[in-house]
Image (cartoon, grey):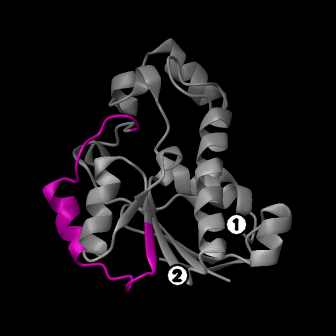
Amino acid sequence: MPDIYLIRHGMTEGNKYQRYIGTTDEPLCPEGREEIKKISYGVPDEVFVSPMIRCRETAELLFPQKRLRIIDQLAECDFGAFENKNYQELSGNRDYQAWVDSGGALPFPEGESREQFRRRTLEGFSRVVTACIREKINTAAVVVHGGTIMNIMEAYGQPERSFYDWHVKNGHGYLIQADNSLWMRNRKLLELKKEL
């Protein structure tokens, strides 16, 4: 039963200003780098990451001696027309108001729908867990995005919670444990071991 650390990348400039940062490939900001340097999660057997520079940089700071295994499907949502904007800049935008009123259920204009994003990230996470089981990996770190973690935990986390209830701060996340037989049968995680 592998232990899997789900870790959100460190803070970026866009995160500081609460912007929707999905496809924008920005690095960690200086404060974000300094915060990540203060965190220690131990040394996992394997490290899986989103292809975005903010995740790769975070993983390199946390696990400097480890090879990074990039999983493209673990990238953040494509926020389309809302990309690199925050709620203040989108105030008065009819499309944004409709998206808010839908509880985030509407697709992002010119971007992904929540279902497309969910399906993609869960496929990526399935690749991670399957690799852990097949390669007999005992501990893995998965350095990704807040939305990616929220999708994974909403789908597989125990105890069950809604998408927004799984929100995590930069540099933090969850330690979960996958039950090999349960995963191979019905794609369920056994338990949330702790919040990081």
Q: CA distance from mark 2 to mark 1?
A: 17 Å
Side of 53 relative to 140 (left or right)? left
Numbered range of the magenta stretch? 22-47
- Using the image, determine if residue 14 lies above or below residue 131: above
Q: Is residue 36 magenta?
A: yes
Residue found at x 64% / y 49%: 123
Please, what is the three-letter code of the amino acid marked with disc 2?
Thr
Which is more toward the observer, 50 or 148? 50
Residue 33 pos. (x, y %) = 19, 63
First in sequence, mark 2 or 1: give its number: 2
Residue 157 pos. (x, y %) = 70, 66
> Within 10 angstroms of label 2, few (less than 14), some, or many (20 or more) residues?
some
Q: Residue furthest front?
A: 135
Residue 164 pos. (x, y %) = 60, 52
Residue 120 pos. (x, y %) = 61, 41
Which circle marks residue 157 in the picture? 1
Please, what is the three-letter code of the amino acid marked with disc 1?
Gly
Side of 134 relative to 143 (left or right)? right
Magenta: predominant secondary structure element? loop
Residue 91 visible in the displayed image: no
> Within 10 angstroms of label 1, few (less than 14), some, or many (20 or more) residues?
many
- Mark 2 vs mark 1: in front: 2
**Residue matched to label 2:** 139
Which is more toward the observer, 96 or 33? 33
Q: Secondary structure at mark 1?
A: loop
- Using the image, determine if residue 29 lies above or below residue 19: below
Image quadrant assignment for residue 97: top right
Image quadrant assignment for residue 44: bottom left
Side of 174 relative to 83 (left or right)? right
Residue found at x 41% / y 38%: 22
Residue 50 visible in the displayed image: yes
Q: Is residue 46 magenta?
A: yes
